[in-house]
Each structure stands twice: as structure tokens, then as C-alpha cells.
Image (spheres, grey):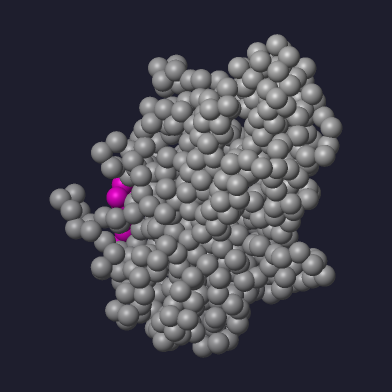
Amino acid sequence: MPDDPRPRFYLTTAIAYANSQPGVHTLYEVIGADVIARWHRMLGHDTRFLTGTDEHSVNIAMRSAEEGQDPRTFVDEKVALFKQAEDLLGIRPDRFIRTTDPDHVRTAQELVRRAYANGDIYVGTYEGWYCPNEGFRNASDVLETARGTICPNHPDVPLQWLSEQNWFFRLSAYQERLERHFEEHPEFVQPDYRRNEMLGFIRQGLEDFSISRAGAGWGIPFPIADNGETAQREDGSWDPEAGTIYVWYDALINYVTGAGFDSDPEAFAHYWPADLHVIGKDILRFHTIFWPAMLWSAGLEAPRKVWAHGWLLAAGGERMSKSRGNFFDPGDFVAAFGSDGARYVALREVPFDKDAEVSWDGFVRRYNADLANDFGNLVNRTVSMTNRYLDRARPAPGPETDLATEWLTVLDSYGRAIDGCLLHDALASLWSYVAEANRYVDAEKPWELAKASKGGDTAADERLRDVLGNLVEACRLLGLAAAPFLPATAPRVLAQLGYAYPYGDDGNGGPPVLDELRWGAHAGEQGRVAAPEPLFPRLETEIAAD
């Protein structure tokens, strides 16, 4: 690791509340981050991908009590649902972190100690609204409605009015440094309009924020007593009077825990700072203002880039939520579309930089149009024609073809789109090439060339081999390039074309993918295509919706 010559890439998702089953809208960012991780692994980068669950919210303690369980049993059950759903969707993190993990507990407490040693935390009194799902809310962060005061991000979760003695973090001390950091690192917060939102918030003036909760509730014990001494007793237990670490302070720290802060200092030195945090737009302030200040206070670097995606919206633009019941169950989603189909339609229908209204019918139309009709049909007829006209012998691609020239442009835009977290644009680039290859079939008419060849036309015979060779090559390149999005399909595409798939289940282990994505990279290799097998069976809307 420290002597690993490969470029390293460390990316994370936000960690989800383990308070109920996940929906597709919850896992959307994890699917996207998995695509980015797979791309970097295939590039040959030393990639570390972290996702997981946030398990210490007051909401979890309340929900577990309602269900007659202790919090640990409750979260264990919910975490199992998250892991099951992520596995169904082909998500392969290097670590699934839980904020109840022992190394995370130690890391969170150590970062509190560092902030204290740096003079950045002090005892004060908090009075105001508290959202059990999100934490303390400023007066400007709540909405007054006919049914009372609500949190805009969790309108169905009743707010609590609290007045208690807490520890506070001196965020105000980092005002100038944050402004300077935003100006000197314009890539730090993306998309740009999100960066501008956060910079505007900073310039309004930053307030210190609470980082503890009073009492010995469900959470990580606060490690410092009011007098500045350790809150740990001689027997190793923690003084309940010291309270617990505020859920957001605890949760953010998972990113350094996951890089090895406590358990593997060499790994931490190698992987930190994170190259990319992928998060939802509603938690941008915590990740781009609170988090850098917390890290600087602990003597650590800020992450290099934070990407904020939008939301999947239900009919009428309503936000999806489990409490409203207007969400898609991951099990049902994968049962209908398959693992790769589910990944594809989620990331193609929803731009990775803004909100989008989605529907089951829309997903089915996208699946049928792009996967069943366009890509699946291209591979199927290419393999079928090679079987029928060339007795399965795989022809070499021709060096001079519009498909080869077009591929250079497509691959460049595809790679740049993934690097820019515009995953929908990356797919649009690839599928423009799928359309180009399908047009090539219709223009060249291999069936007519085959008929002429059979009649003794040697020029037609040569042209037939070139055309089918070009189509086989186009399918090979598409299958490999799409592998981060369609990891289960890519090996099947290459197998039908008579090629070995060189990458592991998570994208690791093969040659640098850009070498493989050169037109004609394997032109000199003899081979035979396999029997054609449908990749994406067409769906009927009514059947899929049942």
C-alpha cells in the first residue's frame, strides 16, 4: 500500500440511517458511487470504496423502543436489509462501515479529544429545535406550517424542543479559512451551483454548533467531562453525566475511520484525504462546512471533492420516503429489471446532478428502449449473424472505419463524464455509440452481403467479414466500457463474442481498461463466437408493475 505505485482513489457515500428498510431512492447514490469505484479499479487505480450505516440517531432509539427491541438488535436487523439490498444491486464496497463498529467509536472519541486540545470545543447551553433524524436545527432551518414546526428534510418526524447543557464546536473560528478554501479550491464542492450555495451560507456568518447530547442515551460516550478531564472511569466504563457525541459529529467521522485512522495508520496515511464524497444535496452543509472545520481542528486535511446529487421524486414532484410509502423496494426493482437493468435505469433516468421525477412506467420504457431494443439487440444480431454467415469464426475488425473513429470521441466523453460525476451523461455517450452501431448494421446490410458472398462474389465476402468484424469489435468495446454500470452483463457480452473477461467481480484484477478499450486491441487473436443469448428480455409494463 504505501509502496503501491498505482494512483490511489478513495471515495465514500453518505451513511444511511439504519431505521427501516432502504428504498431505491436511498441506494441511488450508492449505485452511482459503485460505478465510479468500478471504473477506477478497471483503470488500474488503488481504489477504496466505503459505504455503510449511521446507527446512533435519537430516531433509532425511539423506533427500537416502539418495536420492543434494544437499539443494537434493531439496527442489526436493519443493517442486514441494507447489505442484502446492496448485494442484489451488485454493489461491492471495500468496507461496509457501521457507526457502532469499535474502531469507529475510538476514532470519534479521538477526534473530540483533538478538537478539545486545539481549543475548539467548549461547554454551553443549547435551546431550540432538535430533529431526531438530523439533529439540532437553527431557527432558519425549520418551517412553520399549519401542523406546527417541521424539519424541511424530515417533515414527518416530530421535532423536539430542547434546552440542555452541551459541548459546542467553534465553527465561527473557521469562517475565514473556509471562505479561503472555497475560493482556492473551486473543485471542492460540485456541482458549481451547490458550491455557490454553500459559499453564500458561509458569508452570512457561521455559528458554533452543538456536538453532544445530555444523558447516557444510545450513542458514542462523550470522552470529556465538564472539567476537562477524561469521562472514562477506572473500570473502563463511561460517566453517563458526560452524555454522548452528537449524531452528526459521530457520523461524519466514519470517513476517516474507514480509511484506517484507528486500525491501520499506514493505510490512513495512504488513503486520506478522501478523493470524493458522494452525498445528497440535503446534507451538503454538514459535509462542506462542518466537516472541513472538524478535520482541520484535528490536524487533518479536508476531502478533495464533495459531490451533491439530487433526489428521486415521485409523481407530482413529491419527495420519496418510506413513511409515505411512495418509494421503490430494491427487491421488487431487481426482480423486475435484473441487477444490471436496475442500476442502468436508475442512473439513466435520474441525472446525477439534479432532482428528477420518476415512475415505474418510465423505468420500463427506458429498460426496453435502451437495453432490450438497442444494446441487447445489437449484440444479439451481431453474434447471430457471425454464427450464421461465418460458421462462428470471429472476424477481425477493419482498421479504417467510421465506427473506429467515432469510438475515440465517445470514449473520451465517457471517461470525462464519469470523472465529472455526470453518470447520466456517461451513459448517454455510450448509447449514442450503440445507436451508431445499429445504424451501421442497417446501412451495410450484412444479410445482403452474405447472399452475394454465397453466390461467389469475393468482394462481398471480404466486405461481410469486415462489417461483422467491426460489429463484433464495437460490441466488445461497449461491453467493457459499460462494465461499471452493467457488471453482471459485461462478462456475458464478452463470452458471446468469444473473449475472456479479465476483471474480477468488483472490477479489480485486470489490465488497465484503457488499453483494452483501444479499437482493435485484440485484432490479431483467433477466436469463435458463442451461441447468442438474450441479454435483456423485453418487459411488459403491466407484468413488471405487478
Vertical comparison of 82 with 329: above or below: below
Vertical comparison of 383 with 160: above or below: above
Nearest to the observer: residue 417 or residue 22: 417
Q: Position of residue 91 (x, y in %)?
A: 62, 43
Please report the residue visible at 48 percent of the width from the left and 61 percent of the height from the top.
Answer: 307
Q: How many marks?
A: 0
Q: Left or right of 88: which side holds 364?
A: left
Nearest to the observer: residue 491 or residue 252: 491
Vertical comparison of 305 with 494: above or below: below
Say if residue 231 shows up in the picture: no
Locate the C terminus and report the quarter of the image it occupies. Answer: top left
Say if residue 527 shows up in the picture: yes
Please report the residue visible at 76 percent of the width from the left and 64 percent of the height from the top.
Answer: 6
Q: Is residue 6 magenta?
A: no
Q: Left or right of 34: which side holds 397?
A: right
Q: Left or right of 140: which side holds 83?
A: right
Locate the N terminus and report the quarter of the image it occupies. Answer: bottom right
**Looking at this rendering, what residue extends furthest in the left direction?**
146
Q: Position of residue 118 (x, y in %)?
A: 55, 87
**Looking at this rendering, what residue extends furthest in the top direction?**
455
Please report the residue visible at 48 percent of the width from the left and 36 percent of the height from the top.
Answer: 345
Please report the residue visible at 76 percent of the width from the left and 25 percent of the height from the top.
Answer: 529
Residue 463 found in image quarter: top right
Residue interval drawn in magenta = 155-162
Q: Is residue 159 magenta?
A: yes
Residue 83 found in image quarter: top right
Q: Position of residue 40 (x, y in %)?
A: 66, 55
